[in-house]
Amino acid sequence: LARFLLTFTRNCTPRRWRVLAATFATLNRHALDAYDALAADGVAEPTRPAEPCLIAFRTAAERAAMAEELEHARAAGFRIAYERIDGDRARALEPALGDGVGAAVELHGQRYLNPGNFVRALADAVRKRGGEILERTEVSGVRD
């Protein structure tokens, strides 16, 4: 555990974060296209557009940390659309929020899927094409 934590700590630098975030941003862009291609080719569990996600804060100062995080992600190459809104607008969008909410971020353009359903649909698509899914099987190697 100590070796893992030491390695983890050494990799927790702004430079390493920027390098890895840029890599994941590129993968993310390709992944969304891949999900669309799988859905078009018969995988019956596509991604779905999400309603805007509302992230509420007591104050604009508290919201600033989230906005900064989103800007870092944008700078790394992630495509993130969001809007800073005040507490009145947040409560209008989500009446369950109380008067303690003074600021919010409304995150747009996200997609989601049900991971379990997606994996089952992917396996079904493989089987329909003549593939075989082996479960509870020991793997001793992987070949291309």
Image: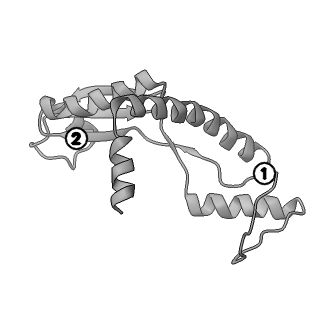
Q: Height in image: 52 above or below 114?
A: above
The structure residue drawn at horizontal position 22% and vertical position 40%, both measured from the top left corner, is: 56
Residue receiving disc 2: 56
Q: Is 66 left or right of 74, judged from the image as shown?
A: left
Relative depth, front residue between 21 and 109:
21
Q: Can the viewer see residue 136?
A: yes
Residue 95 is situated, as x and y percent measured from the top left of the image, at 22, 45
Give, as a three-letter code, the residue at label 1.
Gly
The structure residue drawn at horizontal position 34% and vertical position 24%, both measured from the top left corner, is: 71
Give, as a three-letter code, the residue at label 2.
Ala
Q: Is 13 left or right of 98, judged from the image as shown?
A: right
The structure residue drawn at horizontal position 28% and vertical position 40%, both measured from the top left corner, is: 55
Residue 105 is situated, as x and y percent measured from the top left of the image, at 28, 33
Residue 141 in which image quadrant: bottom right
Q: CA distance from mark 2 to mark 1?
A: 38 Å
- Total numbered badges shown on the rendered structure: 2
Farthest-out residue, top: 75
Q: Label 2's element?
A: strand
The structure residue drawn at horizontal position 59% and vertical position 35%, both measured from the top left corner, is: 27
Which disc number belongs to residue 72? none
Q: Label 1's element?
A: loop
- Dot 1: few (<14), some (14–19), or many (≥20) neighbours within 10 Å? some
Q: Is 116 left or right of 87, judged from the image as shown?
A: right
**Rendered-image quadrant of the N terminus:** bottom left
Q: Height in image: 67 above or below 135?
A: above
Farthest-out residue, right: 130
Residue receiving disc 1: 42
Relative depth, front residue between 89 and 144:
144
